[in-house]
Image (cartoon, coloured by chain):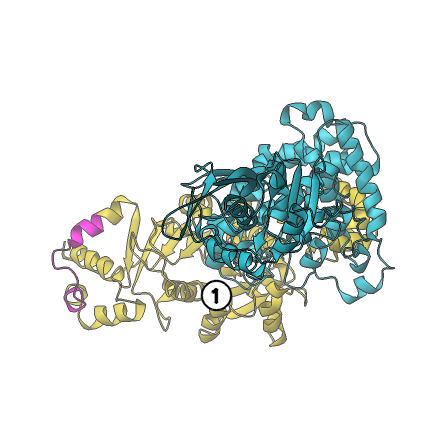
């Protein structure tokens, strides 16, 4: 009973706007939950048991550090979360974890690589941790789901606040098949400072952090710093030197971080033997000669119609027809007025 | 002692006949203007008095009342000065009434008695019933455009009086000035590379499709857009007269021949108010930029920088080809059939449409896109991304095709649309699409695929078919649309709203 009160106060404290992860840890170790709530000027009428009950009713476990279900790997962390809110299957954390992170504003190629890595690493028995954000994060989670695995998502807001709202479906799938983790109790809106804090948990949970695509600055680079602080290996997927979305990852490579060409590179780094994977046959229909010319003209970079007309020398109607066929067959994707080659 | 002289006053782009009545009677000397004059019109007293004295006439030391009939029409501006002066001279018996019989007078007076042109002369002449009209010499060419009346252009009040008294012969009607060859419009040959942008211009010109150019700063969007008027055919007589009336009423400088023959190109700055763009104003009811662009091109550079309510004011005229401006005093309809060309950056930093290339935050991009309402974006049949060509791309090309060659194809394509009786392909009604733009077998498949993948909405479907019709017309194919025609039309209609890579939807 007393424990329940404490847990309820911890949840209240974690949702207090003036309490960040570090302050929460200090308050809990120096004052205890109830005294801490009074110290930060929390509403004395707040009912800790009702808070606890609402979390339990939503199927959310509140894991304090003394809880035996609290993830073991976070205990020795320099900045372990004082409390974790978990929804889903805690067993999904498994034993070997890889974080796949990257920019929200990714290229189609980058998203494709993230999804493929998610799928193939899951096939090899690795648990994928990511942040459920748009772009690379979402693609990695989808890759895990493709392979029938249980994804682990670490988010920066309350577990009932779906952010970004465009990922509502994905969020629901991760919750029902895998595991959602957060430092924030129910109802907490995403605040800018919560995302870097979330990134440290992603890094801390992982044995290896893979950056698929990152601009020169951004949240992924923050995750990389957090991983470096914890001596966790960082690997990066090489990208075109002309792609702004690969500027950050290419810099990481230049600074000596190990490259990821495919899932095997990651498995080797993890010390796992790469299971010989049967090459999945490509079900796409082969492009016709004009289509092949167009595909070759992409040069593996996003291109507009204008680029393609100039590179192929085709007339616009022929080119447009070939592109329609390539789009229909899945060789090419389009976003706005840009086209990208997504398959070899 | 009464003087009656016909004249006219301007409201919007329409002239209204006005009878100027001047009554001179005994009493303390005074000068009163009645009959809904605006401030400029009421100030006629000062100008008329000085002009009469400068021209050797006497000012009647009596009570003078000027009535501008009918009093229900608001009289705007200084165009009634000459008529008031002549009526006053008749009323004060300095001119015989027979001398002004059958003549109407238009023009503003200077203090020295000189006659100055007034805006909207063409519209004013149209409203006059008189068989002879006296106008300022500078407006004579414009006034003679309508024909059917004898037009006398004179430079001063003294010259008008001399003719009225029979001391001088009336000047003969001004000769039709054959317009000089207008200075050449900017030529497409100057645009290097940009094959898609050039083609989109050609389609826009041929089919009357509104065009949105997207691209980073410095990609050449403005350069392309300014080439569009050079691709359009010269205005027909009717269109030329309509545009000239609007330009005249708006006080724009008319070309040497008096008639606007070349499609106008109007490019208002993005700070424009909605009145400046659409027309109106509480007193003058001046036509706005969209009417000045009538039968020509309205170019809105930096589309997203225009105020949202200003852009939404364009939706009704885009649909109906006419803008009705209602004010407390009057409701005026301005013709506004124009080809809309707009240019914008894909996001605030300008690089956002390239996948992975944007520097803006999600919020900044969303705000930027919200400035354009979906219905407005939907009016653009053609949405094309223009990129900065790389140096090698630029150098690998010979000199580009000149405007004249493109215009020849545009004219042929337009002629095909005219034969179908729809004006331009952009105006094909939905219920005639199956008849005028039938789909070949392959074409239907391409459209079905685009609909299935969510790239095309049901609403966009009709627009794509119209553009495909124009693409086919430009190639000389008058039969059913082929897959290539439809694919081309689809590729010229990128999803501008979803162009940011952050919104990438991963499917399959």
The chain that appears yellow in the image is A
Residue A219 x, y percent position in the rendering: 48, 65
Q: Position of residue B214 (x, y in %)?
A: 63, 54
Q: Nearer the viewer, residue A22 or B127?
A: B127
Q: Is residue B432 above or below residue B179?
A: above
Kindly identify which chain the residue marked by label 1 belongs to: A
Q: Quadrant of the image for the C terminus of chain B?
A: top right
Q: Which chain is cyan?
A: B
Residue plotted at (56% across, 66% down) = A215
Image location (x, y in percent) of residue A157 = 35, 56
In-front residue for pair A40/B132: B132
Where does residue A89 sit, x and y in percent of width and height? Answer: 38, 48
Mark 1 packing: few (<14 Cα in 10 Å), some, or many (20+)? some
Q: Is residue A34 left or right of residue B132?
A: left
Please determine whether, in this image, residue B13 is positioned above or below residue A122.
above
Query: Residue tagged by mark 1?
Result: A219
Magenta run includes residue A207: no
Residue B47 lies, with reference to residue A221, above or below; the image says above
Q: Magenta part of the protein: which range?
A: A37-53
> Extreme left residue here?
A45
In the displayed structure, does residue A3 sit left or right of residue B25?
Answer: left
Q: Is residue A44 magenta?
A: yes
At x 71%, y 32%, the residue is: B423
């Amino acid at each position: 009973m007393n424990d329940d009160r404490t847990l309820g106060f911890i949840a209240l404290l974690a949702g207090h706007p003036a309490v960040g992860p570090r302050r929460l840890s200090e308050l809990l170790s120096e004052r205890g939950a109830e005294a801490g709530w009074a110290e930060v000027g929390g509403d004395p009428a707040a009912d800790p048991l009702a808070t606890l009950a609402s979390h339990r009713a939503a199927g959310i476990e509140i894991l304090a550090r003394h809880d035996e279900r609290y993830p073991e790997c976070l205990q020795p962390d320099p900045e372990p979360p004082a409390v974790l809110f978990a929804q889903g299957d805690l067993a999904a954390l498994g034993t070997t974890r890889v974080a796949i992170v990257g920019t929200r504003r990714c290229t189609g190629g980058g998203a494709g690589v993230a999804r493929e890595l998610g799928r193939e690493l899951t096939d090899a028995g690795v648990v994928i941790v990511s942040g459920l954000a748009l772009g690379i994060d979402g693609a990695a989670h989808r890759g895990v789901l493709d392979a029938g695995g249980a994804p682990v998502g670490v988010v920066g807001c309350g577990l009932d606040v779906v952010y970004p709202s465009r990922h509502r479906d994905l969020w629901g799938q991760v919750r029902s098949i895998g595991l959602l983790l957060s430092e924030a109790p129910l109802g907490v809106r995403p605040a800018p400072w919560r995302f870097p804090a979330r990134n440290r948990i992603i890094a801390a949970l992982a044995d290896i952090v893979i950056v698929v695509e990152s601009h020169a600055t951004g949240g992924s680079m923050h995750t990389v710093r957090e991983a470096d602080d914890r001596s966790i290996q960082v690997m990066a997927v090489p990208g075109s030197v002309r792609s702004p979305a690969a500027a950050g990852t290419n810099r990481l490579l230049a600074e000596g971080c190990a490259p990821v060409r495919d899932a095997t590179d990651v498995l080797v780094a993890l010390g796992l033997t790469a299971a010989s994977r049967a090459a999945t046959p490509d079900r796409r229909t082969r492009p016709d000669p004009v289509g092949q010319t167009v595909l070759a003209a992409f040069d593996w970079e996003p291109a507009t119609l204008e680029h393609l007309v100039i590179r192929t020398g085709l007339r616009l109607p022929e080119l447009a027809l070939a592109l329609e066929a390539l789009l229909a067959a899945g060789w090419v994707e389009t976003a706005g007025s840009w086209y990208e080659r997504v398959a070899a | 002692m009464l003087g009656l002289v016909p004249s006219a006053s301007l409201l919007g782009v329409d002239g209204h006949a006005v009878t100027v009545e001047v009554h001179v009677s005994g009493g303390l000397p005074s000068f009163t203007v009645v009959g809904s004059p605006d401030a400029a019109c009421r100030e006629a007293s000062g100008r008329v008095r000085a002009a009469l004295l400068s021209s050797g006439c006497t000012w009647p030391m009596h009570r003078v009342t000027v009535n501008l009939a009918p009093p229900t029409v608001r009289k705007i501006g200084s165009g009634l000065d000459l008529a008031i002066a002549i009526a006053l001279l008749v009323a004060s018996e300095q001119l015989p009434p027979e001398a002004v019989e059958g003549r109407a007078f238009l023009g503003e007076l200077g203090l020295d008695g000189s006659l100055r042109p007034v805006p909207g002369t063409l519209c004013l002449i149209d409203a006059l019933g008189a068989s002879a009209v006296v106008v300022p010499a500078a407006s004579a060419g414009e006034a003679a455009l309508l024909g059917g009346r004898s037009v006398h252009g004179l430079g001063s009040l003294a010259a008008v009086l001399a003719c009225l008294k029979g001391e001088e012969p009336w000047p003969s009607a001004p000769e039709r000035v054959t317009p000089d060859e207008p200075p050449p419009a900017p030529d497409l040959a100057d645009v290097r590379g940009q094959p898609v942008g050039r083609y989109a211009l050609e389609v826009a010109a041929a089919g009357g499709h509104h065009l949105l150019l997207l691209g980073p700063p410095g990609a050449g969007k403005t350069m392309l857009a300014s080439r569009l008027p050079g691709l359009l055919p010269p205005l027909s007589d009717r269109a030329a007269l309509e545009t000239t009336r609007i330009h005249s009423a708006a006080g724009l400088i008319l070309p040497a021949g008096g008639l606007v023959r070349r499609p106008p190109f109007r490019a208002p700055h993005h700070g424009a108010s909605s009145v400046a763009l659409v027309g109106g104003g509480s007193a003058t009811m001046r036509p706005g930029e969209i009417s000045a662009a009538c039968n020509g091109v309205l170019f809105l550079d930096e589309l997203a920088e225009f105020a949202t309510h200003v852009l939404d004011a364009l939706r009704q005229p885009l649909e109906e080809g006419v803008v009705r401006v209602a004010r407390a005093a009057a409701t005026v309809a301005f013709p506004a059939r124009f080809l809309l060309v707009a240019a914008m950056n894909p996001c605030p930093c300008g690089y956002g449409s390239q996948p992975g290339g944007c520097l803006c935050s999600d919020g900044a991009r969303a705000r930027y896109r919200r400035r354009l309402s979906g219905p407005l974006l939907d009016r653009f049949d053609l949405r094309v991304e223009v990129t900065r060509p790389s140096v090698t791309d630029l150098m690998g090309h010979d000199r580009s095709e000149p405007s004249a060659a493109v215009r020849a194809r545009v004219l042929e394509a337009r002629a095909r649309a005219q034969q179908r009786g729809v004006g331009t392909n952009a105006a094909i009604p939905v219920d005639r699409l199956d008849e005028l733009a039938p789909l070949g077998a392959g074409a239907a498949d391409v459209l079905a695929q685009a609909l299935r993948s969510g790239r095309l909405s049901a609403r966009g479907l009709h627009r794509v078919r119209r553009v495909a019709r124009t693409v086919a017309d430009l190639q000389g194919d008058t039969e059913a649309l082929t897959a290539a025609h439809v694919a081309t039309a689809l590729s010229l209609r990128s999803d501008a709203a979803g162009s940011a890579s952050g919104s990438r939807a991963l499917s399959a």
